[in-house]
Image (cartoon, grey):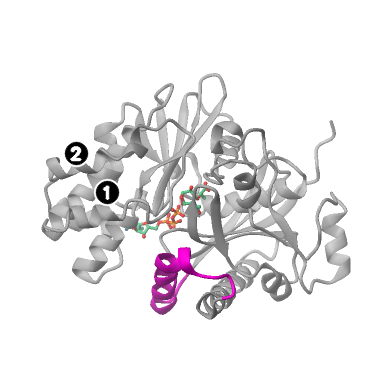
Amino acid sequence: MPSSPLLTAIGLMSGTSLDGVDAALIQTDGTRISRHGPSLTVPYTPELRARLRHILDAAPQLAPSDPILLSAEHDLTEVHAIAVQQLRQMAPDMPADLIGFHGQTILHQPGRTWQIGNAIALSAATDLPVIHDFRTADVQAGGEGAPLAPLYHAALLHDQPRPVAILNIGGVANLTLLTSKGEILACDTGPGNALLDDWTFRHTGIPYDKDGQLAHSGKVAEPLLKQLLAHPFFSKPAPKSLDRLSFHTALQDIAALSPADGAATLVAFTAETIARTPLPEQPKAWFVCGGGRHNPAIMEALAQRLSGQVFPVETLGWNGDALEAECFGFLAVRSLYGLPLSLPSTTGVPTPQRGGRLSCGGITPWKAKAVLNTKMQYNIV
Ligand SMILES: Nc1ncnc2c1ncn2[C@@H]1O[C@H](COP(=O)(O)OP(=O)(O)OP(=O)(O)O)[C@@H](O)[C@H]1O
Ligand SMILES: CC(=O)N[C@H]1[C@@H]2OC[C@@H](O2)[C@@H](O)[C@@H]1O[C@H](C)C(=O)O
């Protein structure tokens, strides 16, 4: 079968940590990665972050037309447009064909996933086709809608000795295992940094536990840790997924602890839930991406508990802060080429599932044609 043409995509991811927008360029045919381009992060202002945090709490009651939501959506779309503009300035030698726009997840429950962000406005602002709404098709087909990174992780890991895993420690943590037989298994494992961020902010006013300083100065409260680990999610087999707020009652459970002991206990909670994830075989090597790999307390706690070796993905020459953004560039190209974004073993969807929607709001017709000639399968909105 002839391979599809290479496309250059800008991937945009604003994760559950609500810290800002990651943007990265990638050149791919949707199967292999031929070039990793530059990447950057445009932080949310503290004010936008606070509004989004409020929306997360209110999301189950919010109507899509709620003015609070529309105004946050407008502002976060602008941050994404700025990220695209800055990235293009950084890489004039890698002109982009399209954008993969994840949007900000504000709700993720069984049967319902909700990312906000205005793809039409982003397409108009950047003059590029935008693929967005990556998770809905999977959820509508009966899948978890997450994690979606596994097919990208598998493409990255193709030449690594197996079994091998990529572990993303963002607000929520998720892993992809490539088994010795080459199967791709995946799931969210539990909390990543989000609980620790909220705890640290509550007690110190600083948005995260920089370099694990607070956790390092505390002691794990073992009985409380045991109580937290009793949650039925942790013994459930993969695939499974989480919302950022899934374990938020944990902060009430540990409320009586000192700031340092609470941080140490939450670090142990993250590491222990990763180590306890039921897997058919244990990876020989764990390659860690996401902001959690910058926290030495988390990396040490993992090394103590995992039988395989633990490395940041930089060991393989990748940028662990850019991987998720690259992933949505990769998935945008897969979407355009009609390739699946998820598998039964990654989201629980009954059959390999395509996904994503295309928006060409305001884009010049010749440019849309140049990209869309590769495959026409969308309703253009
Ligand atoms: N130097 C550091 N020390 C400790 N923690 C850090 C450091 N740098 C980043 N982090 C953590 O990484 C987090 C951001 O991680 P990341 O950008 O991977 O999250 P995300 O992409 O928003 O989440 P998700 O993958 O769940 O969508 C910060 O909120 C913080 O907790
Ligand atoms: C619903 C949602 O946005 N989930 C995120 C979140 O952040 C990490 C984890 O939870 C993962 O399931 C997912 O993101 C990555 C990119 C994924 O889909 O693979």
Which residue is disc 2 drawn over? Answer: 226
Q: Can residue 168 be spotted in the picture?
A: no
Between discs 1 and 2, the one toward the N terminus: 2
Q: Position of residue 299 (x, y in %)?
A: 30, 43
Q: Residues within 10 Å of mark 1 (few under 14, many from 20)?
A: some
Residue 57 among those drawn in magenta:
yes
Q: Classify residue 208 by image quadrant.
A: bottom left
Distance from disc 1 to disc 2, alpha carbons, whole Å, reads 23 Å
Q: Classify residue 37 by image quadrant.
A: bottom right
Residue drawn at the location 30% of the way across and 67% of the way down: 207
Q: Can residue 354 be spotted in the picture?
A: yes
Span colored in magenta: 43-65
Residue flagged by tag 1: what amino acid is it?
Pro
Residue drawn at the location 84% of the way across and 56% of the way down: 372
The picture quadrant for ligand 1 comes to: bottom left
Name the mark on residue 296.
1
- Main secondary structure type of the part rendered in magenta: helix
